[in-house]
Image (cartoon, helix red, strand yellow):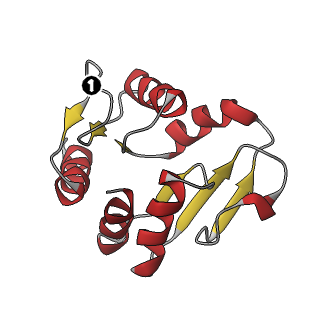
């Protein structure tokens, strides 16, 4: 599902902002890269070489988990694909900032988030929310 989200983001001409490492982040980055999209990876450490191979712009923050605040501030909308505490913190910060937070099946249902049944619906919903006056 993360790979599909990344591909949809690229298809829409948007930039994927993520933590830049492996797992869900790498899958989303791969999907975005496969469609020629840009991937901004905000890394927890000080070494840009730690970025997954699909990140086109690596930003080593050397801030550990605190980089989640930067991710939430940088993104215009957040799409949660499963995830653990890092994802929850990004969701909470995004909600606090008044940003759209969309959750896919398997993700954490948090008050104030929007639900989407698949990657296409999630990206479409994010864009619709951003276009609202």
Name the image quarter holding the C terminus: top left
31 relative position to 118: left or right: right
Give the quarter of the image for residue 55.
Answer: bottom right
Image position of 101 (left or right of 133): right
Mark 1 highlights which residue? 109
Residue lying at 26% horizontally and 55% vertically, measured from the top left? 123
For this view, does 99 lie left or right of residue 70? left
Residue at the image position 56 percent from the left and 42 percent from the top: 71
Measured as percent of width and height from the top left, residue 117 is found at 15, 47
* Residue sitting at the far right: 46
Residue 92: image location, x then y, percent: 43, 23
Which residue is at the far top? 111
Q: Residue at left 45%, top 27%?
A: 88
Q: x, y (%) of residue 84? A: 48, 31
Quadrant holding the N terminus = bottom left
Quick one: 47 or 70, which is closer to the camera?
47
Relative side of 55 to 125, left or right: right
* Residue at disc 1, secondary structure: loop
Residue 40 percent coordinates (x, y): 58, 60
Compared with residue 46, is residue 93 higher up or lower down, i.e. above or below?
above
Instruction: Work out whether residue 81 or residue 48 is closer to the camera in this orientation and state it.
Output: 81
């Amino acid at each position: 599902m993360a790979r599909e989200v990344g591909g949809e983001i690229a298809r829409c001409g948007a930039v994927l902002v993520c933590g830049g490492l492996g797992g869900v982040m790498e899958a989303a980055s791969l999907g975005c890269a496969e469609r020629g999209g840009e991937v901004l990876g905000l890394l927890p450490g000080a070494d840009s070489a730690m970025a997954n191979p699909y990140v086109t712009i690596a930003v080593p923050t050397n801030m550990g988990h605190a980089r989640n605040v930067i991710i939430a501030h940088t993104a215009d909308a957040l799409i949660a694909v499963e995830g653990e505490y890092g994802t929850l913190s990004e969701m909470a910060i995004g909600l606090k900032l008044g940003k759209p937070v969309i959750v896919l099946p398997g993700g954490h249902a948090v008050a104030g988030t929007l639900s989407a049944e698949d990657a296409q619906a999630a990206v479409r919903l994010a864009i619709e929310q951003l276009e609202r006056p």
